[in-house]
């Protein structure tokens, strides 16, 4: 273990000595970041043991580390790694004990995708911050940094030391099915500033930030989880649109960068996915942008990286491209053995292997893991979900909601003028730890402000029966709030909004994911429309406070909203946001 007062030179020397003591198998293991089921490193529930045996061939995290010497473990809610903060902390400590029990003791990088907003693996009672596009609407680098610092402190308290955030993709395509509100916006300069702010926030809290998805996933119309997208930007367009946030993150000293499973012919005409492309990872990221830190692949079980090569070739090609960490392969034994064989055969030199191992261990040293991975840097119960953190989240969220339409000055409403509120509409699966469907959260927020609010979720694809039930429920109401979620041009959500507007009751729509929904609602006679950019409780409470006039709608669109019929024409430009016209002001 490294002594606390060691210099950078001493640290490098100690890392080199550690590498020299490692077997080839241990070095190969350091490259892998793997999922594992269960809330305990040694005694998970039977169902989790069964899942581990079926998918990985081990019973638990300790056995995974002992057999494969993995350098990292990634937490997922669906793998039962998250939930109670104390339980998460116990799992993290158990994992680190298992790392220290190896023949060559090496602690682990424990990671998760805690982007906030639409993607949050660790839910309540942890503090859930507004997501990236909401922060983009707020436009404050100070808020973005503070949100990341608080999130980082809470993750660190639970033993999570690497966060796969922030997203650095510039979302210039409204049809993008996988990025959208996970991006800060469509302006490369604005995105770059917020990315750097969050990198500084996370890393000031003592955890590694990871910007993603290099070289930029913002202009795709397919999802790399299910397909291999192609970005048709020229090299000049890439330099102007996609590169700025990554350049800025490199200059800010970001600890790690995640690759994308996308094809960018202008950067590599071979049409290999970027994760497997030496011209992109080594040529562009390392040599042209000057990045010397850890490069982690996006998950290797995603379709985008598996379409061209077999699962035995993908990890080897990723390393040859210049990647360091190999994230969540579908078959760990196959991937681990393939890398080991590639080194033994000479396809990968041990020198190349050592380069990646050194980068990974230097990051572990920077995070203090080689000194004492079991050190409790913060008291869990006093940090995770602390009242001051929750209040800060609400304050930040209050600066993000965007008012797009306010016909006749309906908004703000009051409990005197519009006391009876029906909240209906979309009810997507909520990010981990939020309290029920978005309609319920909106209704609850209205009730807390003294309104008589009723929730009636109709789903993201309401049936005719759902619509009729909502029409009936609108009778006698003073206002109807419809939560919309990525409305399609020919989708049933448009029918719901149209029928609600036809009741004669004033209708307010709240886009709870991408802000483009309003383009599908022209001519429907809705009274007001807002963009909340997310459906976590904190984002929805902020939208209700705006509708009720408790806060001003100061959020500004971080992306343009094009006309539905003619995408070349802008309905609302970047920076748009209506304000309330109050008498006497």
Image (cartoon, rainbow, N blue to C red):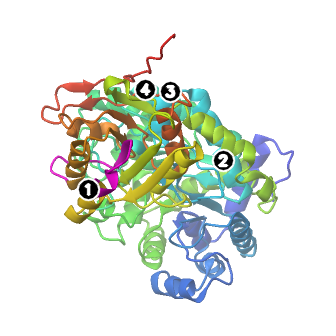
Q: Residues within 10 Å of mark 3 (few under 14, many from 20)?
A: many
The dot on residue 511 is none
Residue 247 seen in this snapshot: no
Magenta region: which residues?
A: 471-491
**Magenta stretch encompasses residue 65:** no
Mark toward the start of the polypeptide (3 vs 2): 3
Of circles 3 and 4, the one toward us is: 4
Sequence-wise first label, 1 or 4: 1
* Left or right of 240 in this view: 136: right
List x then y, in percent, for residue 172: 30, 35
Residue 125 visible: yes
Q: Is residue 375 left or right of residue 291?
A: right
Question: Residue 516, relative to residue 573: is it above or below?
Answer: below
Q: Position of residue 461 (x, y in %)?
A: 26, 59
The image shows a total of numbered marks equal to 4
Residue 484 colored magenta?
Answer: yes
| Numbered disc 1: secondary structure | loop
Q: Earlier in the sequence, mark 4 or mark 2?
A: 2
The image position of residue 478, as x and y in percent, is 39, 42
Q: From the viewer's perspective, is 387 left or right of 258?
A: right
Label 3 or label 2, whichever lies nearer to me, is 3
Q: Which residue is mark 3?
A: 139
Label annotation for residue 228: 1
Q: Which mark is residue 556?
A: 4
Badge 1 crowding class, 10 Å Cα cut-off, few under 14, some 14 to 19, many 20 or more, is many
């Amino acid at each position: 273990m490294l002594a606390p007062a060691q210099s950078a030179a001493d640290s490098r020397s100690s890392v080199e000595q550690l590498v020299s003591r490692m077997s080839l198998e241990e070095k190969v293991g350091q490259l892998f970041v793997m999922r594992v089921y269960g809330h305990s490193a040694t005694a998970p529930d039977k169902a989790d043991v069964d899942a581990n045996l079926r998918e990985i061939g081990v019973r638990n995290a300790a056995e995974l580390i002992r057999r494969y010497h993995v350098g990292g473990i990634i937490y997922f809610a669906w793998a039962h790694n998250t939930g109670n903060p104390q339980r998460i902390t116990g799992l993290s400590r158990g994992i680190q004990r298992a790392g220290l029990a190896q023949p060559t003791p090496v602690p682990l990088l424990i990671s998760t995708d805690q982007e906030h907003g639409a993607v949050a693996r660790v839910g309540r009672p942890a503090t859930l911050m507004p997501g990236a596009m909401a922060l983009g609407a707020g436009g404050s680098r100070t808020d973005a940094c503070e949100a990341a610092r608080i999130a980082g402190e809470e993750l660190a308290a639970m033993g999570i030391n690497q966060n796969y955030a922030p997203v650095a993709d510039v979302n210039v395509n409204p049809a993008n099915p996988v990025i959208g509100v996970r991006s800060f916006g469509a302006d490369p300069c604005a995105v770059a500033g917020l990315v750097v702010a969050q990198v500084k926030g996370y890393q000031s809290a003592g955890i590694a930030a990871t910007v993603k998805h290099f070289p930029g996933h913002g202009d795709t119309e397919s999802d790399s989880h299910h397909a291999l997208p192609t970005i048709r930007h020229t090299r000049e367009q890439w330099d102007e649109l996609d590169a700025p946030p990554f350049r800025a993150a490199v200059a800010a000293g970001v600890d790690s960068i995640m690759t994308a499973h996308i094809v960018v012919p202008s950067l590599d005409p071979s049409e290999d996915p970027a994760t497997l492309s030496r011209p992109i990872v080594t040529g562009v990221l390392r040599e042209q942008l000057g990045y010397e830190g850890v490069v982690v692949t996006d998950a290797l079980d995603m379709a985008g990286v598996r379409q061209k090569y077999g699962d035995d070739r993908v990890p080897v090609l990723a390393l040859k491209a210049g990647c360091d960490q190999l994230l969540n392969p579908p078959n760990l034994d196959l991937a681990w053995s393939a890398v080991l064989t590639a080194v033994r055969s000479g396809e990968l030199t041990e020198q190349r292997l050592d380069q990646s191992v050194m980068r990974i261990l230097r990051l572990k040293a920077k995070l203090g893991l080689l000194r004492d991975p079991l050190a409790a840097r913060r008291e869990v119960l006093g940090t995770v979900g602390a009242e001051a953190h929750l209040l800060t989240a609400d304050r930040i969220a209050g600066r993000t909601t965007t008012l797009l339409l306010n016909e006749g000055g309906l908004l703000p409403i009051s409990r005197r003028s519009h006391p009876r509120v029906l909240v209906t509409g979309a009810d997507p699966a909520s990010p981990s730890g939020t309290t029920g469907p978005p309609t319920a959260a909106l209704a609850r927020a209205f009730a807390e402000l003294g309104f008589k609010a009723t929730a009636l979720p109709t789903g993201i694809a309401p049936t005719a029966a759902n619509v009729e039930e909502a029409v009936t429920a609108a009778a006698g109401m003073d206002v109807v709030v419809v939560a919309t979620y990525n409305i399609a041009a020919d989708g049933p959500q448009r029918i719901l909004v149209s029928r609600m507007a036809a009741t004669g009751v004033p209708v307010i729509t709240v886009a709870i994911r991408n802000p483009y929904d309003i383009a599908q609602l022209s001519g429907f006679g809705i009274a007001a429309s807002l963009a909340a950019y997310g459906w976590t409780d904190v984002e929805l409470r902020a939208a209700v406070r705006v509708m009720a006039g408790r806060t001003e709608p100061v959020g500004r669109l971080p992306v343009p909203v094009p006309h539905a019929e003619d995408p070349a024409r802008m309905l609302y430009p970047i920076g748009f946001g209506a304000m309330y016209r109050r008498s006497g002001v």
